Image (spheres, rainbow, N blue to C red):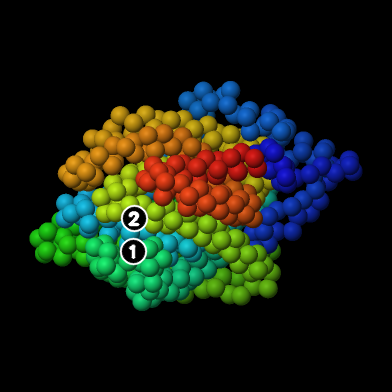
Amino acid sequence: MATSFFHPVIFTYSRKQTTNIPPVKLNTSLTRLRRTIPKSSLQNNPNNLKKPGPKPNKNSFFRFLPHVRNVFKFDELGIEILSIAFPAALALAADPIASLVDSAFVGHLGSVELAAVGVSMSVFNLVSNLFNVPLLNITTSFVAEEQALAYAEINSTIGINTRCDYASAKPMNSKKLFPAVSTSLALAAGIGIAEAIALSFGSGFLMNILCISVDSPMRLPAEQFLALRAFGAPAIVIALAAQGTFRGFMDTKTPLYATVTGNLLNAILDPVLIFAFGLGIGGAAISTVISEYVKNVVKVFDCRDPPSAVEFKSTTCLSKYKWEENWPIFDICPEVDHCHHEFSCGLLVGRTIAVLFTMTLATSMAARQGPIPMAGHQICLQVWLAVSLLTDALALAGQALLASGYSQRDYIRAQDVIYKVLQIGLLTGVALAVMLFFGFETFSRLFTSDSAVLEITRSGVLFVAGSQPVNALAFVLDGLYYGVSDFPYAAYSMVLVGLITSMFLYFAAPVYGLAGVWMGLFLFMSLRVVAGLWR
């Protein structure tokens, strides 16, 4: 196993000295590109005409530490990363903020209702994210690689060897011809319907998994919220597939517009349905479902834009896709390695199970402490996720840019992306930690006026604030895994990390209470960083 972060499997040197680059077979399965590059061919690669970077070695990752100050330099790569990450950060923040708005309104109904919403959302995430997260990440990587290969093929056809500037390039609406788009949307529709059925008819069983007994005061409101929330599952999955498509094209503005539109509607409907119509937590669930369908309509409608007249006459399957009424029609292509797609998705499903199991176990351990501790834990957890997920935007930028450079064999650019994203991520995590340390107590008063719950939240400020730098690095490293399609290591390492953390939670939470739960979550994120740095 390599100890450097930069993956040495990207290329190897052969002993044969020649200037001819061996032919590479490209296929739309987007399997990991493997080739043997002669040493002398690196000087003939147009993408490597700039000053060569350092060779990967054991300490190549720590090379970025003395140069963290370079994050303040707005070079071309930094601007490109921020142009992708900033709209994505706003979009990623919008969904947790919507959950915070729901929690704020529900918190005024009582601590039992707030705890019930926390439990039901954990159950909802347990089911919905099982396939949603793998679908989103695989779609992003595959679409980004397909677009990079398409640009490279066009440039090769017309005799241009320059690397495409993805931040300013116009995709000419040719993205509608990519097979990953139609495949992901069709798959998302089926997954969403299955999730809705599972959540509607299996709510009682799922509550039992979290050890929420029938006589618990949280059981009835939690089941009510979950049953209504299940109707929004299809919209969420389809919207995520569309979002992965936009991310692959490095278009993070369209998902932002859709997310803001839906969440503004949710914020308006929440007080009306919860208080004016007296629906309680059921009103919060209904408003969330309506907003999800609005977001879904906006995203999918943009995918209907008619393609340009540009036709990709390639050796791949891109030219085998037809159009009817502006919607992509999938033709089975014998050149596509469908097993690779399924295997990659299966690996990320296993990884997601490890994450969800660990997070669900943490919620279950917190729920066993009672309604008041669970309500305080819910506030801390929502703020922790909402703020730390902002750095996931950097992971997205790194994933898309790394996938593009990697698929075109621009390895020097790929290494620059890795170091730059890690630098920005570390600095962002430190800034978020300082902000939360001084502002979390005031911020927590927006959710509840219960003094007992507020006392719980005050005790969790070190966990919420202190873990932000670690969270930032963990999310960025995840994005870099996906950018080079290193799905096996991402899955296997997460399973091991989840097992270690779950064992810690199982023994520490009964002894230390919520402090044990928070220590377990911090250990979870720290081990993810260790696994990433080791790779």
Q: Which residue is mark 2?
A: 367
Q: Is residue 412 left or right of residue 283?
A: right
Which residue is nearer to you in this view: 426 or 185?
426
> In the rendered image of this protein, does residue 124 appear above or below residue 51?
below
- What residue is drawn where x is 36% and y is 76%? 201
Residue 354, above or below 392: below
Spot occupied by residue 353 in the image (x, y as percentages of width and height): 51, 60
Spatial CA span between label 1 and label 2: 8 Å
Q: Secondary structure at mark 2?
A: helix
Mark 1 element type: loop
Is there CB contact under 8 Å for labels 1 and 2? yes
Residue 153 in sight in this render: yes
Q: Where is residue 364, by image quadrant?
A: bottom left
Location of residue 427 in the rendering, given as x and y in whole percent from the top left corner: 46, 30
Q: Label 1 is placed on what type of residue?
A: Ile
Residue at horizontal 28%, vertical 58%?
A: 117
The residue that label 1 is drawn on is 212
Q: Crowding at label 1, few (<14), some or many (≥20) Cα neighbours within 10 Å?
A: many
Residue at image position (50%, 48%) is: 504
